[in-house]
Amino acid sequence: KYMLLSDHQNAGQNHDIKIGKRCFENVAQFRYLGTTITDQNLIQGEIKRSLNSKNIKIRIYKTIILPMVLYGCETWSLTVRKEHNLYSSPSIIRMIKSKRIRWAGHVAQKGETNAYRILVGKPEGKRPVGRPIRSWEDNIKMDLREVGWDGIDWIDLAQDRDQWRALLNMVMNLRVP
């Protein structure tokens, strides 16, 4: 099979090419590397086919939407109510928790850096009346409690990278209601 691309409308219509004993048929379209190519160079059908594909929608969601929604989630201090109101999907909650645990490992392993002082430090001055706002470190402790690592100092635990990776895998496999 072959296809002739030309600006001239009548070029190559119904002309088969014969070389030796082989006959090559002229076609108006064919698939090449998963894409349909036409002799008129029409791509509307190809665009429509690819946008209707479930795989492309999933790829767009994973590569564009999720990173935008979860940008900076490592440092968020969320209450349980906010977690479930914002993200009812268990997979997103799991992603937030695993990114937060991963970032906590980086912060703890780096030691007394600015990030450590900001995320773990205690602010000076008087606190407002009422219930204290949940801190980032409180979220880390809650995440550890959910996977059964309660009562362990997370900063010391993060120094052992193998144990920290095991913990991170446990958080990724965590069942979220």
Image (cartoon, rainbow, N blue to C red):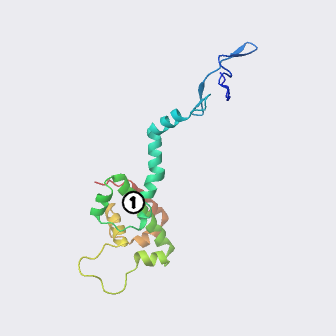
Residue 36 location, x and y as percent? 57, 31
Residue corresponding to mark 1: 96
Figure quadrant of residue 170:
bottom left
Tell which of 117 and 43 is nearer to you.
Answer: 43
Quarter of the N terminus within the rendering: top right
Residue pushed farthest right?
A: 20
Quarter of the C terminus within the rendering: bottom left
Residue pushed farthest top?
A: 21
The residue sitting at 39% across, 60% down in the picture is: 96
Crowdedness near tag 1: few (<14), some (14–19) or many (≥20) residues, C-alpha within 10 Å: many
How many numbered callouts? 1
The residue sitting at 45% across, 57% down in the picture is: 68
Residue 93 location, x and y as percent? 35, 57
Check disc 1 and report its element: helix, strand or loop.
Answer: helix
Three-letter amino acid code at disc 1?
Ile
Using the image, determine if residue 145 lies above or below residue 50.
below
The residue sitting at 51% across, 73% down in the picture is: 110
Using the image, determine if residue 101 lies above or below residue 49.
below
Query: In this image, 72 relative to 90: left or right?
Result: right
Residue 63 location, x and y as percent? 48, 51
Residue 8 location, x and y as percent? 68, 26
Figure quadrant of residue 169:
bottom left
Figure quadrant of residue 134:
bottom left
